[in-house]
Amino acid sequence: MADLTWHASGKGGAVVAENPKAVEAGIAILEKGGNAADAAVAVLLVASIMDYGMFCIGAEVPFMIFDAKKKEVKTLSGLGGAPLDEKGIAWYLQNAIPEGGGIRAVPVPGAVNLFFTALDKYGTLDFATVVEPTLAILDRGNRDWFDELAVTLRKLVSTEKNTAGTRRQKLQAARDRFYKGDIADQLVAYYKEKGGFLRKRDLEAHQTLLEDPVSIAYRGYRVYKCGPWTQGPYLCQTLKILEGFELRKMGHLSSDYIHVLVEALKLGLADRDYYYGDPRFADVPIGPLLSDRYAALRRTLVDLEQASLEVRPGDPVGMKALSDQPGKYRPGRGGTTTCVVADRWGNFVSATPSGNGPYNICAPLGIAHGNRLRSLNTTPGHPNRIGPGKRPRITLTPTLVLRDGAPVMAISVAGGDLQDQTTLNCLLNFIEFDMMPKEAVSTARFSTRHHEGSFIPSRERKIEGLGRLTLQDSIPKGIRNDLARRGHKINTAGGAIASPVMIYFDRKTETFFAAGDPRANRHAAVLENSKAAP
């Protein structure tokens, strides 16, 4: 394959990710006749190696797919939960979730289960085929855990091959070896040795949950996000607030435009921090949060001339613009990579793989784990408070966009709390200002830190940095001065503000347009020579 660049167009299917090897893996699977789900799993497997530090094999992946046959969007929660052990949970509540990571900040590894579930429910190929590009990289050597991980992955391939039965039964047997068999036993021995709370029953109980997305209509499009176990729904809330403003007339990156978007983001983020959590454990009022009536109430809080320096969650149940309880703020950090894939049969995938360091690696298996339990907290009464089996409310937030019931766009962004802020930038660049992906992901952006950080689990919720607005340094000084006059606390950034990738499908020309921000070292490719449908 020729050297990859950051944008491409064509008719046969598209892949955009961070590392070129991951993009090549996805394209290779499409060339073999695999569909978007097959290719996405291949991309994610390679990303766990080549984007190590941003993602790892024992970490997590929220995964969204448009199924062309069923004509529906589903989300797959490739995210593990907290230990089931009540004594372990009591330890966290007494001693705190380790803010610096470590074995006690490790949730159940979710990515591997996600790979098998996506292949089972939506793919067409076997695990042996989609893991080939990853094994080729591991076999060339580089890091000291490559050989061990290659052995582990080949154990899964062997189990798949030697299991009698259907393709589904073979995939299930390989998956079970990781979560219920000898690999699980080795993982549990590692957890015990290092002082972690995860045990065999945690691994055995883990499932990749297949869930309905949340969605809203905006300017003739329907925007789909994962549920409130991610930060995704607040993008929908923000769009509903913005629907009441004539953004196009304000002008792209005008001071009015930036001001209104930032003020709307602050309101959406405040509700994120106040209400969101794993909906299996917390009563998240998602219907009222996304309602027209609530959006209209929240919209009244946007002052066109003055930046808010308060955190202002609303009351969607009581239908009040403001809650009786004030919000709080914490700074945060994170590490994530990106993946969007589309095939010629109309299937679209958007996934946001991630794994926060420092990693905890089970050396005999070559399996690294992140520290995602840091995205829970120990605050009494909070919907995101740690509990047995509870998923943390994560920042990882893929996006699919449909028009008239068919997919037109997939977006994935790396960047912690900046992810949906950057998605908003890119999405409105397309919808409001007619930019194609190449321009939408590379033009100047902005972001706010007027929110809680998502990686500090302390029960204390300090307020600091309110009103901070970061602008790309290419935004003119006059715009920066006008925003400062309105009360924004201005910083500038020379590099990328988060790391977006994007695929758009033009139905009239049946052409894919794919791009990733070159400032963030993203890569894109499009398959020209199409295969017959599987």
Image (cartoon, rainbow, N blue to C red):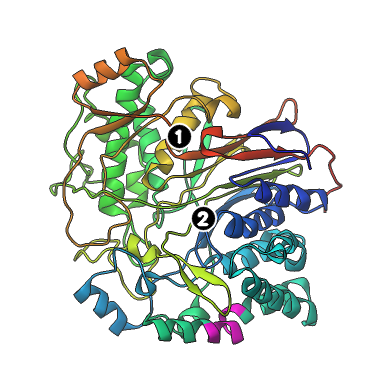
In percent of width and height, residue 481 lies at 25, 16
Overall secondary structure of the magenta section: helix
In percent of width and height, residue 345 lies at 76, 44
Quadrant in which the C terminus appears: bottom right
Q: Nearer the viewer, residue 277 or 286?
A: 277
Magenta-colored span? 178-186
In percent of width and height, residue 82 lies at 38, 72
> Is residue 179 rendered magenta in the image?
yes
Q: Is residue 426 above or below residue 394?
A: above
Q: CA distance from mark 2 to mark 1?
A: 32 Å
Q: Is residue 526 above or below residue 75?
A: above
Residue 460 visible in the current orientation: yes
In percent of width and height, residue 359 lies at 45, 66
Which comes sooner in the sequence, label 2 or label 1?
2
Q: Nearer the viewer, mark 2 or mark 1?
A: 1
In the picture provided, is 443 more to the left or to the right than 94? right
Q: Amino acid at mark 1?
A: Ala
> Is residue 460 rendered magenta in the image?
no
SS at mark 1 in the image? loop
Q: Amino acid at mark 2?
A: Asp
Residue under label 2: 212
Residue under label 1: 496
Residue at 51% in and 47% down = 398
Residue 67 visible in the current orientation: no
Q: Nearer the viewer, residue 197 or 284?
A: 197
Say few, some or many: other residues with alpha carbon within 10 Å of mark 1 (under 14 / 14 to 19 / 20 or more): many
Say few, some or many: other residues with alpha carbon within 10 Å of mark 2 (under 14 / 14 to 19 / 20 or more): some
